[in-house]
Image: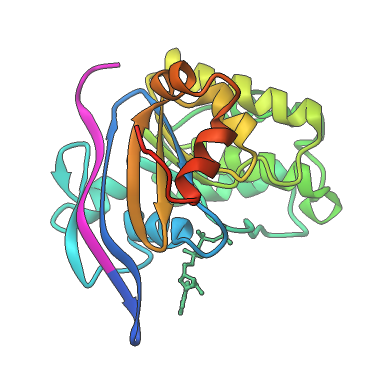
Amino acid sequence: MSGKIAIQTTRLVKRFGENEVIKDCSMCIEEGTIYGFLGVNGAGKTTVFKLLIGLLTPDSGSVEILEHNMFQNRDKMLSQIGSLIETPTFYEHLSARKNLEIHLAYMGNYGYEIDKVLQMVGLSDVGEKAVVKFSLGMRQRLGIARALIHQPKILILDEPINGLDPMGIKAMRELFLSLAKEYGITILLSSHILSEIEHVADKIGVIVDGKIVCETDLAQVKAEYKNSLEDYFFTIMSGGKQL
Ligand SMILES: Nc1ncnc2c1ncn2[C@@H]1O[C@H](COP(=O)(O)OP(=O)(O)OP(=O)(O)O)[C@@H](O)[C@H]1O
């Protein structure tokens, strides 16, 4: 951890028509750490992710990426972010390798070797296979490979372990930990599988009805809630004590 801030949002607000879905959302994520973003269905996680990667524009508030204002340095900041938001789409009849080549060219041809990134996500054996023949889990892995290929400093992953089998989940857990600890990549991820977040996160943020209600070091949660992050999450959801 460098002590520098990778992502900071200040009082973000996003409305869809009359509906204010993100309310006063402030979050702070240190470089080289893993931040688990938790919330029930519809709480606003994906919307925050889309605001961070410029797919949506906030009605008010600010986003700083690597200590630069996102809206004033948009292209430069976006080149530092890799993301997997919702179900990834690919050129279905092209191979995994070709899909990655196309993305790398689009991002300016700077990044990891394709073989390296296929190996990192456990797809070395199927790099030449057409994506149309991929299972859901293989697609998730390829989505993560695509998010990684241009060597971003930040990864934003919405439900990245969806569809993975237990071996795949373990492999992703190890990948996330090594990306953060060895490569210094900052990872912001959401998951409904709290035990997985518990395995990897340094810090958690909980969003309830569009508002971040707490940001806490996971070590503190573990110290106070001996059983699990799940206990803490349910305590917050039922309006109980926050750390
Ligand atoms: N484009 C849109 N237009 C209108 N409402 C939207 C739009 N996108 C999201 N919403 C609403 O914003 C709220 C937050 O949705 P969001 O997808 O961010 O939640 P989430 O926490 O990611 O949920 P999940 O865990 O189910 O993925 C929901 O009420 C949703 O219906």
Q: In which quarter of the image is the C terminus?
A: top left
Taking the magenta stretch, the answer to whether it contains residue 6 is yes
Q: Could you say where residue 175 lies in the image, as x and y percent from the top left?
A: 59, 23
Which residue is located at x 33 percent, y 51 percent? 212
Residue located at (19% from left, 25% from top): 4
Quarter of the view holding residue 203: top left
Q: Is 58 on the left-hand or right-hand side of 142?
A: left
Residue 119 coordinates in the image, percent (x, y): 67, 24
Q: Residue 128 in the image: x percent, y percent?
A: 79, 39
Residue 122 drawn above or below residue 12: above
Res 119 visible? yes
Q: Which residue is rendered at x = 71% and y = 44% of the image?
A: 96
Farthest residue to the right: give it: 133
Q: What stretch is highlighted in magenta?
A: 1-13
Question: Which of the 4 quarters of the picture holds residue 1?
Answer: top left
Q: Is residue 71 in the magenta section?
A: no
Residue in the foreground of this view, choosing between 73 and 187? 187
Q: Tell me residue 35's x, y (percent).
A: 41, 33
Query: Magenta stretch: dominant SS?
Result: strand
The structure residue drawn at horizontal position 66% and vertical position 40%, both measured from the top left corner, is: 161
